[in-house]
Image (cartoon, coloured by chain):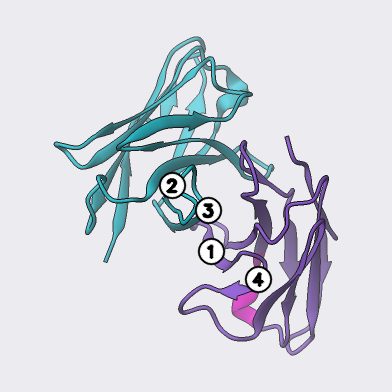
């Protein structure tokens, strides 16, 4: 059974860098799936941040692309998110998710999710 | 970006009611539409993929339909455990985008 376990600081200072890790168990990150990040700001809906595949270039939301890096660590079987130059607008619950795909180019559906991580940007 | 518009933004219904949520895409996305259920404090859950395919383990009272730009999610007989916010999401092209959500209350 595939499980995603998220970890990382819950508080980040303005202009700092948000860093989260998603440990994957029950499946190799070298599988055919994508591994993505989605966030939900307080009182708002879901926003796709981006995703990574072990043998393809990452896909990023253009609205965040200049600040986002999503990477994959095959030795630790985990995926990481880094978001730089954060502001209060980046305060959100962040989820990692498995992106099941049949098209291959990007996720066709997010079928397994991590537990979510509340990240607050504040001094 | 493809804009996804859901209606209504919230609804209140009784146990046993038939509930229908609508999702409209700003351009033709064929069948490439997913539905998620998001309960407070929990991770979103995939209900339906590619407009009408029920994810394994999802109760049969959930169903999806539509194609092109207009899609629906129907709960045939609302249960208390269905209280949640429901989101549509298109995967026709990047960036992947979600609708604004429909909050279902009893």
User: Is the residue B6 above or below the residue A96 in the image?
Assistant: below
Packing grade of label 1 (10 A; few <14, some 14-19, many >=20) is: many
Q: What chain does badge 1 belong to?
A: B
Q: What chain does badge 4 belong to?
A: B
Q: What chain does badge 3 belong to?
A: A
Give the spatial CA distance, label 2 vs label 4: 19 Å
Mark 2 or mark 3, which has the lower sequence index? 3
Residue B20, position as x, y percentages in the image: 80, 74
Tags 4 and 3 touching, CB below 8 Å? no
Q: Residue at x 39, y 51 (%)?
A: A114
Residue A84 visible here: yes
Magenta stretch in the rendered image: B80-84
Task: Write down the residue under mark 1.
Answer: B46
Residue closer to the observer: B65 or A117: B65
Chain identifier of the purple chain:
B
Quadrant of the image occupied by residue A92: top right
- Please give left or right for residue B87 compared with residue A101 in the image: right
- Please give left or right for residue B34 compared with residue A53 in the image: right
Packing grade of label 3 (10 A; few <14, some 14-19, many >=20) is: many
Q: Secondary structure at mark 3?
A: loop
Residue A106, position as x, y percentages in the image: 49, 43
Q: Residue at x 73, y 34 (%)?
A: B1
Packing grade of label 2 (10 A; few <14, some 14-19, many >=20) is: many
Task: Write down the residue under mark 2.
Answer: A116
Numbered tag placed on residue B83 in the rendering: 4
Q: Is residue B38 magenta?
A: no
Residue A55, position as x, y percentages in the image: 31, 36
Give the spatial CA distance, label 4 vs label 3: 26 Å
Residue A72, position as x, y percentages in the image: 29, 33
């Amino acid at each position: 059974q595939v499980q995603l376990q998220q970890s990382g600081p819950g508080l980040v200072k303005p202009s700092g860098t948000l860093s989260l890790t998603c440990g994957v168990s029950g499946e190799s990150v070298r599988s055919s799936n994508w591994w993505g990040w989605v966030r939900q700001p307080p009182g708002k809906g879901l926003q796709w941040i981006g995703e990574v595949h072990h043998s393809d270039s990452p896909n990023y939301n253009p609205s965040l692309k200049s600040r986002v890096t999503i990477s994959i660590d095959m030795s630790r079987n985990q995926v990481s998110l880094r978001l730089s130059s954060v502001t209060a607008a980046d305060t959100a619950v962040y989820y990692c998710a498995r992106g099941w795909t049949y098209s291959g180019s990007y996720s066709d559906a997010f079928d397994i999710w991590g537990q979510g991580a509340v990240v607050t940007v504040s001094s | 970006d493809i804009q996804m518009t859901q209606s209504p933004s919230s609804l209140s219904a009784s146990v046993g009611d038939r509930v229908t949520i609508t999702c409209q895409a700003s351009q033709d996305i064929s069948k490439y539409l997913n539905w998620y259920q998001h309960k407070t404090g929990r991770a979103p859950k995939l209900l339906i993929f590619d407009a009408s395919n029920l994810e394994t383990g999802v109760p049969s009272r959930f169903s999806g339909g539509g194609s092109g730009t207009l899609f629906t999610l129907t709960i045939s007989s609302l249960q208390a455990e269905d209280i949640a916010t429901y989101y549509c999401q298109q995967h026709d092209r990047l960036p992947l985008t979600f609708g604004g959500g429909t909050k279902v209350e009893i």
